[in-house]
Amino acid sequence: SEKISLTLKEAQLLSIFAAHLNQIVDRDYLKKEVWENEGVIVGRSLDMFISKLRKKLEQDPTVKLTNIHGKGYKLEV
């Protein structure tokens, strides 16, 4: 029942995860989809935004954003 504000990047990431529920989304795919138009991608930007998104999603125990080591991330519902 609570509204949670997302930044543009967080919303873009969540949109990609929602389109690929319970599937591994490759790190390079995420970087390309969210940061490609900006030219330079800072290596840790993705990790920082994933961390922020996790904190916002943790209020719902049925939603889990999991790191799949060496591959990417998975939004599990």
Image (cartoon, rainbow, N blue to C red):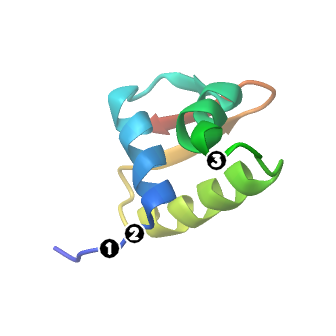
Which residue type carries mark 1?
Ile
Instruction: Give the label on residue 4, or none.
Output: 1
Q: Secondary structure at mark 1?
A: loop
- Disc 3: which residue: 38
Point out residue 72 in the picture as x, y percentages from the top left corner: 67, 30
Q: Earlier in the sequence, mark 1 or mark 3?
A: 1
User: In whole angstroms, how far apart are the C-alphas of marks 2 and 3?
Assistant: 31 Å
Mark 3 crowdedness (10 Å alpha carbons): few <14, some 14-19, many ≥20 = few
- Is 16 located above or below residue 52 in the figure? above
Q: Residue 26 in the image: state x and y as whole percent.
A: 64, 25
Please tell me whether residue 69 is drawn above or below residue 4 in the rendered image.
above
CA separation, marks 2 and 1? 10 Å
The residue identified by callout 2 is 59
Asked if residue 68 lies left or right of residue 15, the reply is right
Q: Earlier in the sequence, mark 2 or mark 1?
A: 1
Res 34 quadrant in image: top right
